[in-house]
Image: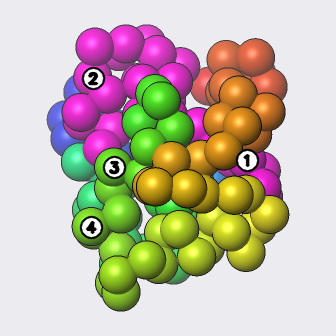
């Protein structure tokens, strides 16, 4: 699978993340059958900022940390977007991460 095709698959999953929910780079990679490619999912999210319809702010690391925040315009845009959806963020980490976590394997198994 080439990078462009992989990125498109990542974006298709990211578009399914519901408002007010988040997922992780690793959860997307696992869902796509490449569980050791979380970093590639991160690269796809970083490349998505030119596209308005990709909710990259809803993808965080496995602990709920906003590790991608430096790739957003503005100092706290990622945090602001998440907070506007009702999530609480303290010290760059989502409060009650498990409560807000959306697992594509569980929530959307037929999507692939």
Q: Residue at x 61, y 73 (%)?
A: 81
In primary-sequence order, the first of circles 1 and 2 is 1
The residue lying toward the viewer, choosing from 103 and 66, is 66
Where residue 29 sits, quadrant-wise, is top left
User: Residue 98 in the image: x percent, y percent?
Assistant: 70, 28
Instruction: Tell me what residue is drawn at x 37 percent, y 13 percent.
Output: 35
- In the image, residue 62 sits, relative to residue 87, either above or below, namely above
Mark earlier in primary sequence (1, 3): 1
Mark in the foreground, 2 or 4: 4
Residue 2 within the segment the image draws in magenta: no
Can residue 43 be seen?
yes
Residue at numbered disc 3: 67
Seen at 33% across and 55% down, the residue is 68
Quadrant for the N terminus, please: top left
Label 1 sits on residue: 21
Q: Position of residue 59 (x, y in %)?
A: 50, 47
Q: Are marks 1 and 2 in contact (CB under 8 Å)?
A: no
Is 76 positioned to the left or the right of 20 in the image? Answer: left
Give the residues drawn in magenta, as a range.
16-42
Q: Nearer the viewer, mark 3 or mark 2?
A: 3
Residue 37 image label = 2
- Which residue lies under the disc numbered 4? 70
User: In the image, residue 19 lies at what x, y percent?
Assistant: 78, 58
Tell whether label 3 touches label 4 (CB within 8 Å): no
Q: Is residue 108 above or below residue 12?
A: above
């Amino acid at each position: 699978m080439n990078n462009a095709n992989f990125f498109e698959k990542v974006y298709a999953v990211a578009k399914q993340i519901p408002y007010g929910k988040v997922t992780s780079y690793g959860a997307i990679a696992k869902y796509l059958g490449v569980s050791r490619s979380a970093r590639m999912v991160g690269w796809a999210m970083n490349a998505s900022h030119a596209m308005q319809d990709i909710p990259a702010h809803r993808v965080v690391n496995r602990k709920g940390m906003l590790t991608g925040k430096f790739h957003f315009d503005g100092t706290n845009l990622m945090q602001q977007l998440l907070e506007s959806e009702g999530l609480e963020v303290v010290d760059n980490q989502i409060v009650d991460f498990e409560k807000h976590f959306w697992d594509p394997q569980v929530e959307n198994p037929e999507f692939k």
